[in-house]
Structure formats: structure tokens, C-alpha cells
Image: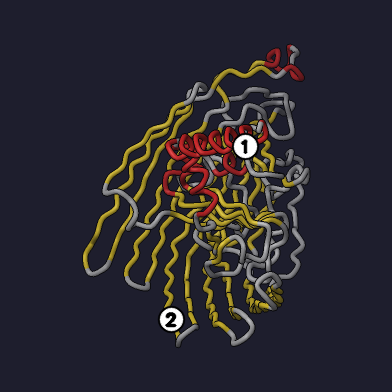
């Protein structure tokens, strides 16, 4: 009899708990998260798949996650991902994966993309865009796709540690007007204005612009606490200012993206000399822009063809003051990159196999310039190199579906470079050289 009463009491408690759970919003949201559709990813195979179908270990950060946790930069979002870590040297942010983060590497082993467009610049081959130097505001991000490990044959050699594709929100889904502001305790200020407009005839336009400014702060470095280095105190340094602009026009099967941004950083310490510790004249400028036009259309019942043409621009400039026996010298580094790229892809659902993806890509450098020179007391050229390159690539990837649980992906890629190896020639000089940029 006691066992019967215990069973009845247990059943009653279960019914009551289920009734309470039905009224609990958190329980409802948990059930929704359990049974809702999996997030989608496009960068893994150049076509939309859910996480179960993607041939890689993929993490997706959604727009809801960005808003919930208040991520202000791409680096802040990646720092919360399993296996990723973020470091900062007061000029650039660096991302590491499972402890691999080489000093001075400038993130050349990552592939960062915006809507499938590679952000790798042609001068240093870096993807050094994690802070405000990444010119896309987080308010515009629909999702961040993080594909761990070496990239497939679809993208080439940069994505060794990870391939990161930032997908922006569609102009159709954006509100007609939006204004947001940011502020922090270290003096940073930022304002973002965006608007989405329907132009008629199926055309939608999204335009966004932002400006940010940080006048700097006073920093104390215990390792530099000596009279020669101002007792380790740097005043009014570590400032940052710049702007971001982004535009996206969608009309039928056409997609036009314009991305223009600039960031100027005031570092508290020179890169390879501390004699002028805390000098407020040191500056680092980064600019990364591109304009891309893409078109896609269906071919037959299961095929799809895509074409894209883009113009990319990269600018780097710095100024560092260095001491000499007579007077301080000013060392400048410049890097100018301009290039055109085009890509043609064709994907088709092969019978009894899976999706076959074929493609060809051409990158044509218009300029690939590096300069290093001293300006005070007189101009002395230390480095001047301009070697534009041309790269032609073809690739193929076949998905093979053995069963619902077993799949295989086979890929091939061939790249041909006009400048496989270039030996740098330096101009001899008695002036001190600078290591303030990846050029040196």
C-alpha cells in the first residue's frame, strides 16, 4: 500500500511540475532551442547548409548572440568561442587558436571574409582586422561563421587555423532608420547611423556609417619605470579614431557591396626603441576598402552559376620618432595595395552523389608598394619595392553522400603565381631602420 501511495504522489508531482514548466518562459525557450532548425553556414562549401551537413567543425555566432552579449568588435566575439583567444599590443589585436598565436604573424594564417569576399590584403597577406580596424559595425552582422582547421580547396592557403565568414543583414530585413551609440569607461565614443530604403522594381538599398574617437588615456608600464622612460608613465596616448561605411544594394539576382573604412591609432610605445617612451607623435593608419558586384542564377533544375568582380584597396602608413646622436629622427613606413579580382563558380547536384562545385579565380595586382624612409633631418630611402603579382586559380570539390550519416568531401585546387618568389632589395643607409610594420 505504501508503494502505491508513493507512485501516486510521484505521478502527481510530475504532472504539477509539467504544468508549471508549461507556464515557465525559460522552459518554453529551452524546448524551442532543442527542436528548432539548426543554424545555417555557407562558407564551408560555397552553398547553404545546416551545421549537421557542413563538412567541418563549425561555430555560428548569431545576431541575437551579438546583441545579447554586447560584442562591439569581431575580436570580442571570437574571444568567447571555444579554443580561441585574443591578445593586444596596443596597436593590433591578435587571435590565437588552441595556443597557436605567433608574435608578429599579423594573422596571416586566418582567412576573414565578408559575405564570402576575402579580406586578405595583397601587400603582407594578412587578415589583421579584429578591432575597430575591421570596418563593419556589429549592428549589421547577421551571423559569424567560424570553420575550424585548414580551409578547403575553395579558398586557397590563408585559412590554416580557421576560416571566418561574416554575413551581413539583408537590406530587406533592416529597419528604415536606426541610430545607436557606444561609450566606455576609457573614453571611447562611437555613433552608428544606418538606413534601409526600397528603391522600387525589386531593388533594396542598405547604407550605414559610423564614426569613433578615443582621445587616449594615461598608462603605467612597470617594466619601464625609470627616469629615462618617464618613470613608466605615458600620458594622452593609446588613442584611436576613424570611420566605417558600408552599403549593400540587392536587385533581383544582383548584389553590390561597398566597404570603406579608416582607423588611426596612437601607440604608447615605439616598436623597437623605448628611448622616446610615451611620445604622442607616433601614429599608425590602416585603411581597407572594396567594391564588389556579384550575380547568380539557376541553371537547369539543380545547377547554379555565380560570377563576381571586385576592386580592393589597402593602405598602411605609420610615423615613429627615434632618437639619434644629434636630433630625433622620424621614420615612416608606407604600404599601398590595389588589385582586381574575379571569380566564376558553378555548382550542380550530381545524381546519386552530392553537390559538385567547380570554379576559377583571377587576382590581378595594380599596385603592391612598400616604402620605408627617414624624413628628419633629411629624407633617406631605406626600402622601395613595387612588385604587382597575378594569380590564376582553378578548384573543384565533390560531395559524396554514402548514407545519411556518412559523407565524403574531395577537393582539388591549382594556383599559378607570376611572382612565386621575390627577393627584396634594400637601399644601404646609416639611418636606423624601422620595424613598425609587417614590411620589415
The residue pinned by badge 2 equals: 298
Front tag of 2 and 1: 1
Could you tell me which residue is drawn at 75 percent across and 59 percent down? 424
Q: Does residue 317 show up?
A: yes
Q: Name the quadrant containing residue 80.
A: top right
Q: Nearer the viewer, residue 126 or 2?
A: 2
**Separation (CA) of disc 2 from disc 1:** 61 Å
Q: Earlier in the sequence, mark 2 or mark 1?
A: 1
The residue pinned by badge 1 equals: 7
Q: Name the quadrant containing residue 324.
A: top right
* Residue 411 to residue 193: above or below: below
* Residue 151 to residue 279: above or below: below
* Secondary element at tag 1: helix
Q: Does residue 377 show up?
A: no
Q: Nearer the viewer, residue 344 or 151?
A: 151
Q: Where's residue 40, x and y in %?
A: 53, 60
Q: Where's residue 321, x and y in %?
A: 64, 31
Amino acid at each position: 500500500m505504501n508503494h502505491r501511495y508513493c507512485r501516486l504522489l510521484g505521478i502527481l508531482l510530475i504532472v504539477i511540475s509539467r504544468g508549471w514548466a508549461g507556464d515557465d518562459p525559460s522552459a518554453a525557450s529551452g524546448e524551442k532551442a532543442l527542436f528548432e532548425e539548426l543554424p545555417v553556414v555557407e562558407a564551408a562549401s560555397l552553398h547553404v547548409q545546416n551545421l549537421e551537413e557542413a563538412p567541418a567543425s563549425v561555430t555560428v555566432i548569431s545576431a541575437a548572440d551579438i546583441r545579447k552579449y554586447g560584442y562591439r568588435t569581431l575580436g570580442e566575439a571570437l574571444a568567447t568561442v571555444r579554443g580561441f583567444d585574443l591578445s593586444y599590443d596596443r596597436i593590433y589585436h591578435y587571435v590565437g587558436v588552441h595556443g597557436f598565436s605567433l608574435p608578429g604573424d599579423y594573422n596571416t594564417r586566418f582567412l576573414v571574409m565578408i559575405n564570402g569576399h576575402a579580406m586578405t590584403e595583397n601587400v603582407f597577406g594578412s587578415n589583421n582586422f579584429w578591432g575597430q580596424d575591421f570596418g563593419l559595425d556589429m549592428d549589421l552582422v547577421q551571423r559569424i561563421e567560424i570553420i575550424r582547421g585548414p580551409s578547403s580547396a575553395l579558398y586557397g592557403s590563408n585559412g590554416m587555423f580557421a576560416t571566418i565568414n561574416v554575413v551581413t543583414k539583408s537590406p530587406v530585413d533592416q529597419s528604415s532608420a536606426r541610430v545607436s551609440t557606444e561609450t566606455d569607461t576609457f573614453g571611447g565614443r562611437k555613433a552608428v547611423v544606418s538606413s534601409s530604403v526600397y528603391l522600387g522594381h525589386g531593388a533594396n538599398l542598405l547604407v550605414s556609417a559610423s564614426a569613433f574617437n578615443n582621445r587616449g588615456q594615461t598608462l603605467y608600464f612597470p617594466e619601464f619605470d625609470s627616469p629615462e622612460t618617464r618613470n613608466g608613465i605615458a600620458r594622452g596616448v593609446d588613442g584611436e579614431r576613424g570611420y566605417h561605411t558600408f552599403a549593400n544594394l540587392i536587385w533581383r539576382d544582383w548584389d553590390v557591396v561597398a566597404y570603406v573604412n579608416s582607423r588611426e591609432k596612437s601607440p604608447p610605445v615605439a616598436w623597437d626603441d623605448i628611448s622616446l617612451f610615451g611620445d604622442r607623435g607616433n601614429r599608425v593608419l590602416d585603411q581597407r576598402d572594396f567594391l564588389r558586384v556579384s550575380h547568380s542564377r539557376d541553371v537547369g533544375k539543380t545547377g547554379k552559376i555565380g560570377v563576381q568582380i571586385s576592386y580592393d584597396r589597402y593602405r598602411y602608413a605609420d610615423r615613429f620618432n627615434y632618437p639619434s646622436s644629434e636630433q630625433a629622427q622620424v621614420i615612416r613606413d608606407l604600404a599601398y595595395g590595389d588589385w582586381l579580382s574575379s571569380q566564376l563558380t558553378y555548382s550542380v547536384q550530381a545524381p546519386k552523389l552530392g553537390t559538385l562545385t567547380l570554379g576559377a579565380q583571377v587576382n590581378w595586382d595594380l599596385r603592391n608598394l612598400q616604402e620605408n624612409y627617414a624624413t628628419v633631418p633629411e629624407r633617406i630611402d631605406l626600402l622601395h619595392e613595387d612588385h604587382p603579382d597575378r594569380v590564376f586559380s582553378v578548384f573543384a570539390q565533390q560531395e559524396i553522400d554514402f548514407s545519411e550519416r556518412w559523407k565524403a568531401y574531395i577537393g582539388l585546387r591549382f594556383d599559378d603565381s607570376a611572382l612565386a618568389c621575390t627577393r627584396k632589395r634594400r637601399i644601404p643607409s646609416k639611418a636606423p631602420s624601422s620595424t613598425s610594420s609587417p614590411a620589415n
